[in-house]
Image (cartoon, grey):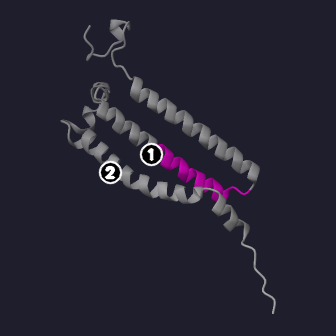
Amino acid sequence: MTTETVEAPRSARTARRSTNWEKWGWIYMRASGVVLVVLVFGHLFINLLAGEGGVKAIDFAFVAGKWADPFWQVYDTLLLWLALIHGSNGMRTIVNDYVGRPTTRKVFLGALVASSVVLLVLGSLVIWTFSPCPAGAPADLLPSICSR
């Protein structure tokens, strides 16, 4: 009687040696989705219901006043990063599922990564460097909230 061992499939060998990015992407989508629901409803409540006037009260001065507080800068940055990475991960999944040609898939995924990085950097810069009353600006261009 001869005993033969069957070699493990390549995918099992690879899974043991490397990080399972699909698993971590799946976990990220679930965790970020839960956090995003809380952040989005908090955002909507503060901006639309807690103020005096609802959506009509949201203007330049409202945003300037909100972003003067570091808590709201962190809150909005967290909302931006989680939502953009969550959406990009979803788009990555769609590209992987529906784009058959490897070269086209790589181009789409590269464009997705590039656009996501650009939007994250620009959005973060807007939130963290926002100044409603820049020094040296002409007085006629400054909003009414700035002392002249």
Q: Residue furthest left?
A: 52
Between discs 2 and 1, the one toward the N terminus: 2
Residue beneath disc 1: 83
Q: Is residue 115 above or below residue 90?
A: above
Q: Quadrant of the C terminus?
A: top left
Q: Residue at x 32, y 28 (%)?
A: 67
Q: Position of residue 144 (x, y in %)?
A: 26, 16
Assign the N terminus to one quadrant of the image.
Answer: bottom right
Picture coordinates of residue 2, whole percent (x, y): 81, 89
Q: Position of residue 42 (x, y in %)?
A: 29, 46
Q: Quadrant of residue 23?
A: bottom right
Name the quadrant containing residue 117. top right
**Residue 118 bears which disc, if any?**
none
User: In this rendering, is residue 33 above or below 75?
Assistant: below
Secondary structure mostly seen in magenta is helix
Circle 2: is it few (<14), some (14-19), or many (20+) Cα within 10 Å? few
Residue at (69%, 65%) from the top-left corner?
A: 13
Local secondary structure at mark 1: helix
Tell me the amino acid under the disc marked 2: Val
Q: Within 10 angstroms of label 1, few (less than 14), some, or many (20 or more) residues?
A: some
Residue range corresponding to the magenta coloring: 84-100
Q: Is residue 118 magenta?
A: no
The three-letter amino acid code for the residue at tag 1 is Ala
Q: Can residue 93 be found in the magenta stretch?
A: yes
As drawn, is 3 to the left or to the right of 30? right
User: Quick one: 44 or 24, which is closer to the camera?
Assistant: 24
Q: Which residue is mark 2?
A: 38
Callout 2: helix, strand or loop? helix
Q: Is residue 55 left or right of residue 88?
A: left
Cα–Cα span, label 2 and label 1: 12 Å
Q: Residue at x 25, y 11 (%)?
A: 147
Please state if 107 lies on the left or on the right of 122 as rendered.
right
